[in-house]
Image: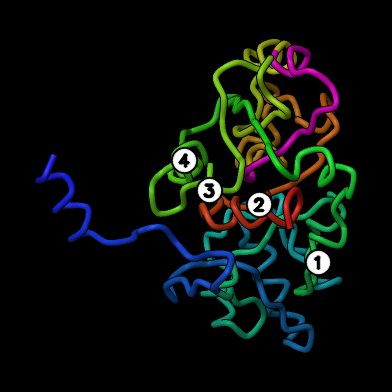
Amino acid sequence: MLKLIRTRINQGYRTSSYPKKDIQLHESYRGRPQINHNCDPELARRCATACPQDAIDPEKGLIDLGRCVFCGLCERLSEGKFISFSTNFELGVADPAQLLCDGNFPDLAAHSKQHFKRLFGRSLQLREVSAAGCNCCEADTNVLNTPFFDLSRFGIDFVASPRHADGLFVTGPVSRNMKTALLDTYDAIPSPKVVIATGSCALSGGPFRDSSEIVPLQDLLEVDLFIPGCPPHPLTILSAMLKFFKL
């Protein structure tokens, strides 16, 4: 016991001070995109043509964050003259139309459904379903349960049974084989309930969006919160849930 106490004292307090204090991520992190609408149109078209996700509209100067996998190819091709990625990890949106980004982001807290704050502001229990995901989004979500993030201090927890949950947390592109399991899980969650789509696969199908084996999540369920990324940074997930349900 004394050894444990000594170790705890030596380690000190390890939990992040976010959201009370801002966190600066490493410069290599690709977060909220910044778009130069005055760049050479030919350069914008070149980036759009090269985009593996067909996520760029060069004429309107938009990038679809639902499709974007944040590979950074457009930034490298344009040398940052058309699109560059900041280290801002706050990417969550409440409206799928807002995934079409022109470089400006709405305030998620202002656009959230306020009745969800009243319902789940003190406690939010989520059942996660990996609907044929690659385990990247799942792994970064699991990180939120580590002492550094300590998700439960905000009253947010992931539970084993959908009957104990307030909402569904979906990752993966939803394969045909997972469709029934996903819908059964949703039906088992008592109302009122929410649906959170996390990662480009859940938002748009990601790299698999044109596959006949994929069933778009929004064709099955009404999604309340969209969290872009491939995978989303743990702070992206945390900030989105805090702004939408808590702050």
> Label 4 amino acid?
Cys
Q: CA distance from mark 3 to mark 4?
A: 6 Å
For disc 3, the neighbor class at 10 Å (few under 14, some 14 to 19, many from 20) is: many
> Label 1 amino acid?
Asp
From the viewer's perspective, is the residue at label 4 or at label 1 nearer?
1
> Label 3 amino acid?
Pro
Where is residue 164, by image quadrant? top right
Compare marks 3 and 4 and give the one earlier in the sequence. 4
Extent of the magenta region:
185-200
**Residue at 73% across, 86% down:** 40
Query: To which residue does mark 1 refer?
Result: 107
Q: What is the residue that sits farthest to the left in this orientation?
A: 3
Compare marks 4 and 2 and give the one earlier in the sequence. 4
Q: Position of residue 14 (x, y in %)?
A: 34, 59
Compare marks 3 and 1 and give the one earlier in the sequence. 1
- The answer to which of 150 and 61 lies nearer the viewer is 150
Query: To which residue does mark 4 refer?
Result: 136
Query: To which residue does mark 3 refer?
Result: 231
Q: What is the residue that sits farthest to the front in this orientation?
A: 2
- The answer to which of 226 and 206 lies nearer the viewer is 226
Q: Position of residue 144 (x, y in %)?
A: 48, 46
Q: Which mark is residue 228?
A: 2
From the viewer's perspective, is the residue at label 2 or at label 1 nearer?
1
- The answer to which of 221 and 187 lies nearer the viewer is 187
Q: CA distance from mark 2 to mark 1?
A: 15 Å
- Residue 12 among those drawn in magenta: no
**Residue at 84% across, 49% down:** 96
